[in-house]
Amino acid sequence: MHRLTVALLAAVDAAIAVAVGIAATLAPLTLVWVFGLGATADWAALWPASATVWQFGNLVPLSITLPADYLAAAGIDPDAASFALSLSPLAFAAFTVIFAARSGVRASRADAWATGAGVGIAVFTALAALVALSARNPVAGAEPWQAIVVPALLFAVPCVAGAIVTEWSEAGAGPVAALRDRVEAHPAWGSVLALGARGAAVVVVGLVGLGALVTATAVVLRGGEILALFQAANADALGAAVIALGQLAYLPTLVVWGIAFAAGPGFVVGEGGVVSPSGTQTGVVPGIPVLGILPDSTSPWLLLLALVPVGLGAFAGWVARSRLIASGGDAGASGEHELLGPRLAIAAVIAVASGAAAALLSAAASGALGPGRLAQLGPQPGPVALAVGLEVLVGAAILLLAPRSRERDASADAAPTGQTGLAVETRPADDRDPADDRDPADDRDAAAGPAAFDPDLSPTLDLGPRKSGPDAPVD
C-alpha cells in the first residue's frame, strides 16, 4: 500500500479515537443539559465538561475546586472544597489503547508501520492539545502538559507496540525483521523472547478473565446492597441513567481490583481500609451504588484463588514448552539432552512480564476519588506485581522445568524410517544359522514330497453342460 494512503488511514484512526471518546461523554451530558437543567442550562459549559471527562478517562489527573456558592448550598465543609481526582474510569483508556494497537497493526500489515504510527501519534497529540486548550474548566482543571502528554502516551505506546509485534511475527523484510532473524539465528536461545512474550500474553488474558469473574460474582452476591444504595440516592430516571453510565465506565477499574483481590494483596479503600482474602476492613465508604460490592468480611478459603494465577502460569509454560519442543530449540548440540538455560529464561520472562503488566494495570486502577479517606483507593502496584510474578513463576517453572518423557522418543529412535513403533531384530553375520542360507523354494518342495499331490487342487477345464445317454459324445 502507498505510504500516503497509510498516513491518511492512520490519521483517520487517530481522529476517530478522539471523536468517539468525546462523543461518549458529550451525548449523555447533552441529555442532562436538555432534560435535567432545561432553561437554566449553561451551554457554554457543555464542551468543557465533556472534554474534561474525556481527559479524566484517559488517565489525566484533575484538580477539583468547588465554588463557594455550591459549598453553602450543599453544606459542605470548606476544607473539602479542593481535592485531587485521579481514579480514572478505565473504559475510556481501554478504548484508546485497543484502537491505537489496531492502528499500529494495520500500518504494519500495509508495509509502512513507521509512517502509519508516526502520523497517527502526531494527529492524536495535536487533537489532544486542541481539546486541552479549548476546554478550560474552572471547577475541574488539569495541568496543560498533562492534558496533552498523558493521552498522547496512552495512544503512542500501544500503537508502536502493536506495529512492532506485528512486524516481528509477520514481516519478511525491514529493520525489525532483520533483528528478529538475527535473534532467532541461535538455535537454543533465539525463541526465548518470543515464547516468553506469548506466555505472558496468555497469563494477562487469563488474569483479566479472572478479575471479571470475581467482579461478576461480587455483583451477583451483593446485588441487594447495590440496589439499596441506588434507592438511597433518590435520583430520578435521568440521574439514575447517568449514575449507571458512570459505573459502567468504571467497570474495567473494578476488574483490575478483582485481579488484585484474587492474587492475594487486595486493594485499598481509603486510609486504613483494605479488602483482601486474608481480611477486610473498609470502614465508612461513599454511597456510590457500585461500591456495594465491597464485602463486609471475607473467608480465608478465598486465599485459594491464588492458585488460579499459578494455573495460568502452568498453562503458559505448557504453551511455551510445546512450541519449544516443536521447534527443536530445547535440545543441545547432541540432540539428546534438553538445555536448562532457555527454559529458565522463558519462565523468567513470563513471570517478569506478567508482574509488570499487573503493576501497570494496578497503577492505572488506583488513585484519589475525593477528599479525606477517599484520597487513596485501588490496588498497590508493588505488592500486586510481586504476588502475580511469584505465582506465575511457580506455575511456569512446573511445566517448563519438568523432565520430558523419553518413552515415545526411544520407540521412535528404535524404529526404522517409515515404521515408527516397530522394532526390527538383527543378528551379526557370524551368528547366523547355516540353514538360513537355503533357498525358501527348496523348503517348500521338501515339505510337499512325492505324495503331496492332491487331485482336488489340480486345475480343471470347464466345457459347459454335458449330455447323458447313448447319444452322449465320447471324450
Image (cartoon, rainbow, N blue to C red):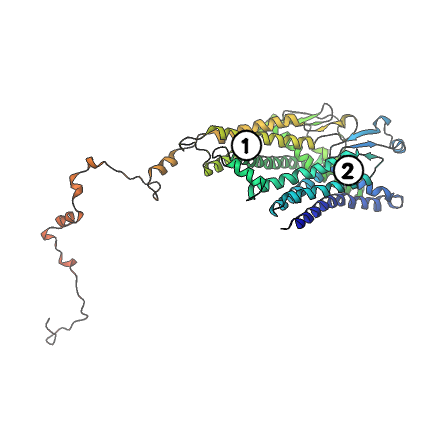
Choose top left, top right, bottom left or bottom right for residue 222: top right
Question: Which residue bears the numbered disc 1?
Answer: 313
Numbered label attached to residue 231: 2
Picture coordinates of residue 174, whole percent (x, y): 58, 42
Residue 164 horizontal/vertical position (percent): 61, 40
Residue 280, visible in the rendered structure: yes
Note whether 450 is above or below 275 in the view shown.
Answer: below
Select label 1 or label 2 by which is in front: 1
The residue type indicated by label 2 comes to: Gln
Q: Which is more toward the observer, 144 or 257?
A: 144
Q: Does 232 sit left or right of 73 as displayed?
A: left
- Image check: 69 left or right of 377? right
Q: Earlier in the sequence, mark 1 or mark 2?
A: 2
The front one of 297 and 126 is 126
Point out residue 129 in the picture as x, y percentages from the top left corner: 77, 39
**Residue 66 locus on image (x, y percent):** 85, 32
Amino acid carrying mark 1 in the image: Gly
- Residue at the image point whose x is 76% and y is 45% from the top: 23
Q: Secondary structure at mark 2?
A: helix
User: Is label 1 in contact with label 2 (beta carbons under 8 Å)?
Assistant: no
* Residue 303, quarter of the rendered image: top right
Query: Between residues 220 and 355, which one lies in front from this camera angle?
Result: 355
